Image (cartoon, rainbow, N blue to C red):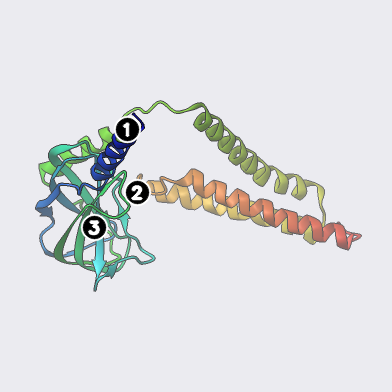
Amino acid sequence: MKNTIFAACALLLFASQSSAAEPANVTLQVIETDPANRTELHYDEAVYLRIAYSTDRPVRIFTRPFLRGERATTGNGPTTHAAPLLPAGSGETLGWFSYRGYAAVDEVRVTAVAEDVRDPVATLSIPMQLYWDDARSATPRTKPAWVATLNAAQQQALSAYVPPSSNDLWLGELVIMVVFAVIVAGIGWPIWAWRKWRGYWQLLAGLPLAILGFWILVLIVSWVVDPTSHNLWPFELAMWAAGTFLYMAIVASARWLRRSPDA
């Protein structure tokens, strides 16, 4: 009896290991690109790839630019697409990337990554000669219909509702509360100090407020020129508030140590 149980356990273990070690059956194909192979692009103009895939397991498909065999990463980008989890089967998906300034690309690699596998399960290399400058295009480039169709499907997949766990909700609320507190403190502290302090301490307290005012002015002008610019302005505000909080802590500590008569 014991031998039978041992043999059954060994058989199950072998079967599970064989299943886990079974190689993925994934194929990738770039049907077309927009724009063409050798192209000069302007600031933040994207390159789109229409990718056909066939997979026997859920995968995420990424599109990454390369230059001379290395990831083409600069201070100007790239900005790349999100990769929703695609179910097993076949279909098409959209890959894209762009740069906000000067950049060059000579190869694009499309990779499929499975949830339970560390390394890519499939990779496709596409030679492409692409160049970006820092000029803004006066008129948006006309895109083929498949870009809008695949982009809409991708956004729908990314926005699919996943019920959050109670831990996720608690952590999210905590982060929001901390960020809100930092912003309130970053704005309120220099305002209070500017009203209460005197002399050069008052000027030091007013410096972050002047920076905030200048940033708001830049924000308004940017929105007038390009309504899509500064989409991440809440994060910019939070970063300013965190820096201001640290700055005010240093100034307040120096003021307390100096105990200046004009403070």
C-alpha gap between disc 2 and disc 3: 12 Å
Q: Secondary structure at mark 1?
A: loop
Q: Earlier in the sequence, mark 1 or mark 3?
A: 3
Task: Locate residue 219 relative to residue 187 in the image: left or right.
Answer: left
Above or below residue 183? Residue 159 is above
Identify the residue at horizontal 38%, vertical 49% (top origin). Answer: 229
Could you say which is closer to the camera, residue 59 or residue 232?
59
The percent position of residue 168, horizontal first and vertical second, equals 50, 32
Q: Is residue 226 visible?
A: yes
Query: Observer-nearest residue: 221 or 49?
Result: 49
The residue that mark 3 highlights is 137
As helix, strand or loop, the secondary structure at mark 2 comes to loop
Residue at 48%, 53% in the rendered image: 218
| Amino acid type of the residue that numbered disc 2 sits on in the rendered structure | Asp
Q: Earlier in the sequence, mark 2 or mark 1?
A: 1
Residue that numbered label 2 is attached to: 226
- Residue that sits furthest to the bottom in the current view: 68
Q: Nearer the viewer, mark 2 or mark 1?
A: 1
Q: Is residue 142 visible?
A: no
- Secondary structure of the residue carrying numbered label 3: loop
Question: x, y percentage for residue 190?
Answer: 71, 49
Position of the C terminus by quadrant: bottom right
- Look at mark 1 in the image and give the residue it sits on: 159
